[in-house]
Image (spheres, grey):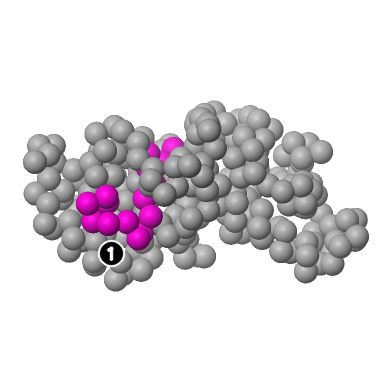
Amino acid sequence: MHQNLLKLGMLDSQPLVLKGLKSLFEGYADIKVTGVFEDSYELFDAMPADPLDVLLMEYVLDTSDLNGAELIRCLRQQYPQTRILVFSATQDPAIVALAMRLGAHGYINKRAHEEDIIRALRRVHDDGRYIDPDMRDQLPDSLAPITPREARGDLSEPRIQALLRTAELSPCEYAVLRKFVAGANVMEIAERLHKSPKTISSQKAAAFRKLGVSTDNGLYRLVGTAADPALSASAFL
């Protein structure tokens, strides 16, 4: 039996998932669930009072909440002692790679067996890293972390380039995102690239998905340019 008590928090927007997980972990003497959260705001309210050893978190939360990339970045900056295990149904290698590079310590699919979930939790708790076996061969050879300085936005251009390399945008997605960050809207981009607005919207959405964001502001916060999107335009030119 594992001797080190694991203080676990769980974050998921689906209450039934949380209920099922809590019931599951009650059968393990070395795992103590100390927090159950349906959104990141509940999580951050509770964290200062009772820091977690490991947070088991869904990457794709409600649209009104932080996206997974933003949440991981905030947690690593504010609570570096807490280990992060992403527990999600997403199978997008780009998103998993981005989560790991931003500071997550592991990823496991929601369809994983009980013994694999427990193994992942214990490995992450023991300062290790864990990636779901079904995902390992699909990830880039390098999962080099995005440095804290880059994560704060102090080096906007290198940070954006690092994110784009991880996300593996197609040439069309890259072109659309480049013009979008430079300040153009969907109609303007469609006119410049001689494509339909519907096509441009689809390519923009695909790029957002690969970067792990769901809104325009989410993209700007991710690259550290929320105050002025034009500040990072040069990185795409």
**Observer able to see residue 97:** no
Q: Is residue 95 left or right of residue 48?
A: right
Placement of 17 over or under 128, stated as above or below: below
Residue situated furthest bottom in the rendering: 16
Say what amino acid the circle numbered 1 marks. Leu
Q: Which residues are magenta?
A: 103-117
Residue 232 on image: x %, y % = 72, 39
Placement of 190 over or under 179, stated as above or below: below
Q: Is residue 107 magenta?
A: yes
Q: Is residue 121 magenta?
A: no
Disc 1: which residue: 18
Residue 121 on image: x %, y % = 26, 45
Quarter of the image containing the C terminus?
top right
Q: Is residue 159 left or right of residue 143?
A: right
Q: Secondary structure at mark 1?
A: helix
Residue in the picture at 53% in, 33% down: 141
Q: Is residue 72 left or right of residue 169?
A: left
Quarter of the image containing the N terminus?
top left
Residue in the picture at 41% in, 49% down: 134
Q: Is residue 166 left or right of residue 125?
A: right
